[in-house]
């Protein structure tokens, strides 16, 4: 069923595990993630970036597809449909389209403007029964086409934004989007502990989950991270499996060119990745 991310993340924080946000790109992606969540009896968050929303013919198409799929596949685990790194304008588009959760990425605004816009969205989301994620301190990587090393958020700023009434907070702790460079210094647990102490029971979000070593993920969860975003890892798994299929010449055998056959290994690879992450994050059987 489609729900906001609020309850599932409160439960995760209390239970010391994290719920995965897996970004979707098309029908196959969505189906693979929903089926795996059901199979693992795990709550799940489907992430949609603005670019992916545009690619899939708009947020309304996405919301209607997800709702229909939940119905058709008889998905009973809690599913949140969440806008990833939304601009102010995209947040309203997703509210209208029927999403159950949004992230307002106001990190590039001056703090006063971030506060004003976040305050407004807190009110709208509460009225609609939706959950809201805010970001403090820019998360590095390829965000907005700029590659950075991963900033660390100011714990006092985190406390200020958390107190506005958001449901989850993404704080930069040296994490970055995409693949991590060889000279990456690792997550700043010092920052995470300081943020955690300031914001109390507020669920924290770790962006850029691809390639963070398992022991760091576990430590981050123990320090209050309750939502972990995974995007690139599913893309890499899908691409590798598809490459293997084509390189083996399987698309040239029989009806191997049929998209239902051509895309099948990639779909299985996404499922395996999602399963592995749910096990690592501890969300299996927490639906
Ligand atoms: Zn992110």
Image: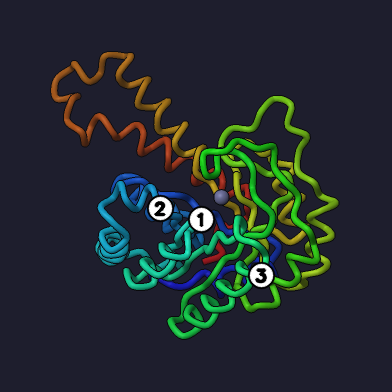
| Residues tagged 1 and 2 counted as in contact (Cβ below 8 A) | yes
Q: Is residue 159 above or below residue 83?
A: below
Of the two numbered discs 3 and 1 on the same chain, state the one appearing first in sequence.
Answer: 1
Q: Position of residue 276 (x, y in %)?
A: 55, 43
Numbered badge on residue 85? 1
Label of residue 112 in the image: 3
Asked whether the viewer can see residue 227, the reply is no
Please report the residue visible at 51 percent of the width from the left and 37 percent of the height from the top.
Answer: 233
Whether residue 268 is situated above or below residue 192 in the rendered picture:
above
- Mark 1 C-beta to ligand 1 under 8 Å: yes
Decide which of 40, 140 is in the foreground and name it.
140
For image coordinates 37% across by 53% down, the residue present is: 35
Left or right placement of residue 217 versus residue 264 in this view: right
Query: Which of the 4 quarters of the picture holds residue 118?
Result: bottom right
Q: Which mark is residue 50?
A: 2
Residue 130 or 116: which is nearer the viewer?
116
Q: Specify whether 115 is left or right of 242.
A: right
List x then y, in percent, for residue 121: 51, 75
Image x and y of residue 102, in percent: 48, 66
- State how far apart marks 3 and 1 are (Cα): 19 Å
Number of marks in picture: 3
Q: Which mark is residue 98?
A: none
- Measured from the top left, where is residue 265 in percent x and y? 34, 31
How is the model colour-coded? Answer: rainbow
Q: Would residue 15 be found to the left or right of residue 25 on screen?
A: right
The secondary element bearing badge 2 is classed as helix
Mark-to-mark CA distance, 1 and 2: 8 Å
Quarter of the view holding residue 257: top left
Quarter placement of the N terminus: bottom left
Q: Quadrant of residue 9?
A: bottom right
Name the residue rendered at 48%, 78% in the picture.
125
Q: Which element is circle 3 on?
A: helix
């Amino acid at each position: 069923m489609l729900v906001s991310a609020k309850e599932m993340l409160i439960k995760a924080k209390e239970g010391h595990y994290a719920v995965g946000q897996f970004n979707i790109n098309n029908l196959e992606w969505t189906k693979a993630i929903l089926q795996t969540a059901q199979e693992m009896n795990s709550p799940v968050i489907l992430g949609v970036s603005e670019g992916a929303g545009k690619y899939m013919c708009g947020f309304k198409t996405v919301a209607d597809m997800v709702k229909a799929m939940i119905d058709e596949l008889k998905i009973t685990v809690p599913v949140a449909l969440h806008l990833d790194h939304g601009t102010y304008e995209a947040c309203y588009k997703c509210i209208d389209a029927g999403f159950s959760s949004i992230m307002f990425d106001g990190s590039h605004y001056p703090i006063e403007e971030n506060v004003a816009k976040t305050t407004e969205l807190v009110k709208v989301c509460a009225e609609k029964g939706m959950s809201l994620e805010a970001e403090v301190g820019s998360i590095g990587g390829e965000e907005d086409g700029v590659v950075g090393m991963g900033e660390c958020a100011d714990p006092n700023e985190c406390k200020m934004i958390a107190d506005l009434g958001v449901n989850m907070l993404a704080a930069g702790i040296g994490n970055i989007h995409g693949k991590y460079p060889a000279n990456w210094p690792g997550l700043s647990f010092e920052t995470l502990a300081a943020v955690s102490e300031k914001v109390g029971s507020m669920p924290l979000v770790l962006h850029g989950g691809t390639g963070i070593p398992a022991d760091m993920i576990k430590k981050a969860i123990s320090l209050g991270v309750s939502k972990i975003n995974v995007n690139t890892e599913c893309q890499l798994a899908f691409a590798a499996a598809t490459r293997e299929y084509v390189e083996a010449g399987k698309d040239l055998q029989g009806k191997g060119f049929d998209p239902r056959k051509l895309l099948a290994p990639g779909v299985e690879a996404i499922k395996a990745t999602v399963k592995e992450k749910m096990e690592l994050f501890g969300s299996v059987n927490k639906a």
